[in-house]
């Protein structure tokens, strides 16, 4: 009974906060008699308008495609590279200064170069998403390897375990929780970057939808609807990534 009540509380409390925020929003708009800023109902009506004519699904699909491609490339490059840097001291000493220098550069700062190199199209935002999400995964994976307790490695060595078996059976399972953390950070940044890139250099996607709605007759109901949809999809992407924490190989890390 207490477990069910706790689960209900986890759902009910955020919903109460959301309802309160919407109520305050509605009251403020009505009281100020704003002719531009929409009420929550107008935002919902605008979202349904976009959904009915198919525009919304086209923009969502374009944004998700770019995020999926860029984030997938970051996974393929970042995780093996992070494992290698964490396992091989020479690789870490050689590459870490370069990555630490590139990592603080805002992905938005790469937009002019991305357009110069790849033109205006899907490749530019995919490159920006790759740049934004690969560094968190490299850093987090490398850090995970470095934080493995040395007694585990020494114990395996005492039993005559080969270096390759040690890497597969001890290092990788121990690092998986840190990899998932890096993935969560990377997917969050990737979703943020794709929206920013679409506002500047593209003619599709949720970022472009915000700018187009603003320019096409000050449709702020569609602007806010797009922003809400971006937030909801970001929450869903994070939730999907967190499902990996339930895998048996990493669940030990999250047991309370």
Image (cartoon, helix red, strand yellow):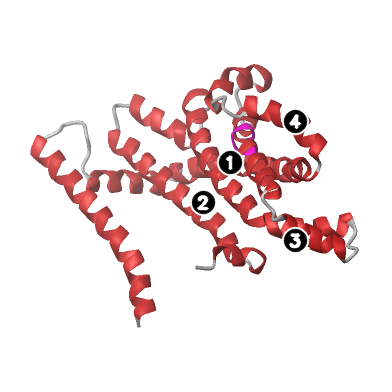
Give the number of the mark in front: 1 or 4. Answer: 4
Q: Quadrant of residue 2?
A: bottom left
Give the number of the mark in front: 3 or 2. Answer: 3
What residue did someone put label 2 on?
237
**C-alpha distance separating marks 4 and 3:** 26 Å
Sequence-first tag of 4 and 2: 4
Please name whichever residue, 193 or 185, is drawn nearer the observer in this view of the structure.
185
Instruction: Work out whether 16 lies above or below 50.
Output: below
Q: Position of residue 167 (x, y in %)?
A: 81, 55
Q: Residues within 10 Å of mark 1 (few under 14, many from 20)?
A: many
What residue did someone put label 1 on?
67
Sequence-first tag of 1 and 4: 1
What residue did someone put label 3 on?
152
Give the number of the mark in front: 4 or 3. Answer: 3
Give the number of the mark in front: 4 or 2. Answer: 4
Q: Which residues are magenta?
A: 130-134
Q: Could you tell me how many numbered marks the image carries?
A: 4
Dominant SS type (magenta): helix
Q: Residues within 10 Å of mark 2 (few under 14, many from 20)?
A: some
Instruction: Work out whether 171 lies above or below 204.
Output: below
| SS type, badge 4 | helix
**C-alpha distance separating marks 4 and 2:** 30 Å
**C-alpha distance separating marks 3 and 1:** 37 Å
Sequence-first tag of 3 and 2: 3
> Which residue is found at the position 35% from the left and 72% from the top?
6
Please name whichever residue, 69 or 110, is drawn nearer the observer in this view of the structure.
110
| SS type, badge 1 | helix
Please name whichever residue, 12 or 222, is drawn nearer the observer in this view of the structure.
12
Q: Quadrant of residue 84?
A: top right
Mark number, residue 6:
none
Q: Position of residue 248 (x, y in %)?
A: 64, 69
Mark number, residue 95:
4
């Amino acid at each position: 009974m207490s477990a069910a009540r706790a689960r209900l509380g986890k759902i009910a409390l955020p919903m109460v906060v959301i309802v309160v925020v919407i109520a305050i929003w509605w009251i403020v708009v009505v009281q100020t008699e704003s002719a531009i800023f929409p009420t929550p109902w107008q935002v919902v009506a605008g979202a349904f308008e976009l959904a009915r004519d198919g525009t919304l699904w086209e923009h969502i699909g374009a944004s998700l495609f770019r995020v999926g491609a860029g984030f997938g490339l970051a996974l393929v490059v970042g995780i093996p590279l992070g494992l290698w840097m964490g396992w091989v001291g020479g690789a870490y000493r050689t590459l870490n200064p370069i990555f630490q220098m590139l990592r603080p550069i805002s992905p938005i700062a790469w937009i002019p170069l991305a357009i110069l190199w790849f033109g205006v199209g899907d490749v530019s935002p995919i490159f920006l998403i790759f740049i934004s999400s690969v560094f968190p995964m490299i850093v987090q994976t490398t850090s995970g390897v470095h934080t493995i307790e040395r007694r585990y490695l020494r114990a395996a060595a005492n039993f005559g375990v080969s270096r390759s078996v040690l890497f597969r059976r001890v290092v990788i399972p121990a690092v998986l929780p840190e990899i998932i953390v890096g993935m969560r950070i990377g997917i969050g940044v990737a979703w943020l970057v794709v929206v920013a890139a679409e506002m500047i250099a593209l003619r599709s996607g949720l970022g472009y939808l915000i700018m187009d709605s603003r320019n096409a007759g000050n449709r702020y109901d569609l602007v806010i609807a797009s922003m809400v949809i971006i937030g909801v999809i970001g929450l869903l992407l994070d939730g999907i990534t967190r499902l990996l924490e339930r895998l048996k190989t990493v669940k030990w890390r999250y047991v309370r």
